[in-house]
Amino acid sequence: MTRFYLIRHAEAEGNLYRRPQGQYNSNITMLGRRQVAALAERFRDVPIDALWASDLIRTQSTASAILKYHPDLTLHTDTALREVDVGCWEDRTWAEIDRDFGEQHWRFTHDPEKWHVPGSEDYRALLERVEGALLGLAAAYPGKTVAVVSHAFAIRAVASDLSGTPFGEMPFGDNTAVTTIEAEDGKLKLVTYGDGSHLGALSTFAHQGLAGDHRGEKADGLPVPMELPREGALYTRAYGETWMASHGDLKGFAPALYLHEAERRVQQDPWCLAKLLYGGALAGIIELDPDRGADDGAGWISLIWVEEPMRGRRFGAQLLGHAVSYFRHRGRDKLRLHVSQTNDTALRFYEAMGFRKAGVAQGVGGPLYLMEMDIAPKVWRLP
C-alpha cells in the first residue's frame, strides 16, 4: 500500500486578490509563507519517502515545507498535478466572473461536470489526469509514503470522486490543508480530507471570512475604469483624504495638478485609474503610472484609497491585485510607491502585502519611504 499526503498549496496571490488563477503562475503571499512554516512543523517527524508537486510556483514553494526537515528528499514536479485550467477566467476577478458568467460560476462551484467556458478544461479530464498521476506514483513507490502538493479544485474533485460525495457538498480545503489517500491494487481510497489543524490563526478562510464551501461573505470587488473628467470630484476627494492620512494636513496638496495628470494617463489607458465596486457601492480607487519606473522594470502606484465604511474588508488587497496583474502582464518585475514615514497604518498594510522599505525620498509634505515589492513569479524556499 502507498500512502499519499495530498497537500493544497499555501495562500497564493489569487486567494488574496480574489482572482481565479488555475494554471496562471502566481507567487505565495506573506501569510502563505507563514502557513508553509506551520506545515513544516506538522511534518517534522513524519516519515516521507518522496516529494512531488505540480510544476506551478505556488506548489513548489509550498513543498519547501517538507524539505525543511527532510533535506535528503528531491522535489519532483509533474504537470498532471496542476490545478484545473479555467480558460478565459484566468487572472480575472471573481466579481467580473459573477457579472459575466453567473450561471457558469455556480456550476464551477456546485456542478463542475456541467461547467464550461472558452478555453477551460473538462472536469472528467481533470480527474483522469490527477488520479492517473497518483496511480502512477503508487506504482513507482509501492509501500512508501509520498507527499504531493497540488491545488484546491483538483484535490476537491478527487476527494469527491473517491468518497462518492457530490462535488457541491464537498467543501474546499484550506490553504496547506492535508488530505490522506491510500493506493493499493491499482485503486485509490480516501482516508481523511482537508485537515488544516496545523493552521490555527493562519487559516486563509479565517483571514478572509470565508467558509470552507466559499458561501461566506466573499466581499469580491468589481474593478471598472473611472470616468474623467465626470468623476473628477470623487478622484480629488480620494486623493485629498489619502494626503491627509499621510501628512496630517493639506499643505502641498495640488488637486488640479494631480487631476490633470490622471486625465492624461486615462487617455492613454483607462485601466490606469480604476474604482472598485461592491454591491454597486464604491469600495476604493487605485491609480497607476505606467511611465514612472518603466526603465527599471518597475510599475508605479500613485494612489490606493479605500472608502471609510469599506475598510478592513480586504478591498485594499484587491486593489493591489489589480496593480500586480496590470504591470505583470506588461513585463514589470516589481511594484513601487511612496508612503509617509508617519503613516503607520499604511506601512503595516504594505509590509503585510509583501512590500519592503527600499529607500527614502523627500516629499512635498515631509519624508517618504520608497516601498518596493517583487512581482516576478519566483519559487520561494522556506529558510
Image (cartoon, rainbow, N blue to C red):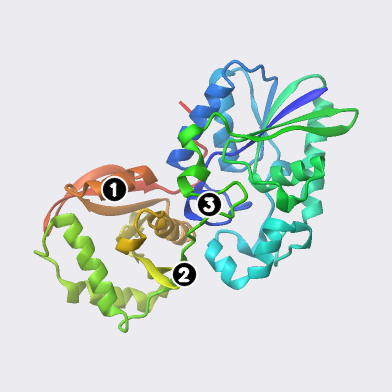
Residue 85, horizontal then vertical, whole percent: 68, 55
Element marked by disc 2:
loop
Q: Residues within 10 Å of mark 3 (few under 14, many from 20)?
A: many
Residue to which mark 1 is pinned: 371
Alpha carbon distance from label 3 to label 2: 21 Å
> From the viewer's perspective, is 99 left or right of 186?
left
Give the residue type that dot 3 points to: Gly
Alpha carbon distance from label 1 to label 3: 22 Å
Residue to which mark 3 is pinned: 14
For the point 58% across and 56% down, the residue is 20
Residue to which mark 2 is pinned: 279
Of the residues under marks 3 and 2, which one precedes in the sequence? Answer: 3
* In the rendered image, the vertical position of residue 175 relative to residue 122, given as above or below: above
Residue 338, horizontal then vertical, whole percent: 24, 53
For the point 83% across and 34% down, the residue is 188
> From the viewer's perspective, is 181 left or right of 199?
right
Q: Residues within 10 Å of mark 2 (few under 14, many from 20)?
A: few
Element marked by disc 3:
helix
Residue 194, horizontal then vertical, whole percent: 65, 37
Residue 376, horizontal then vertical, whole percent: 46, 48
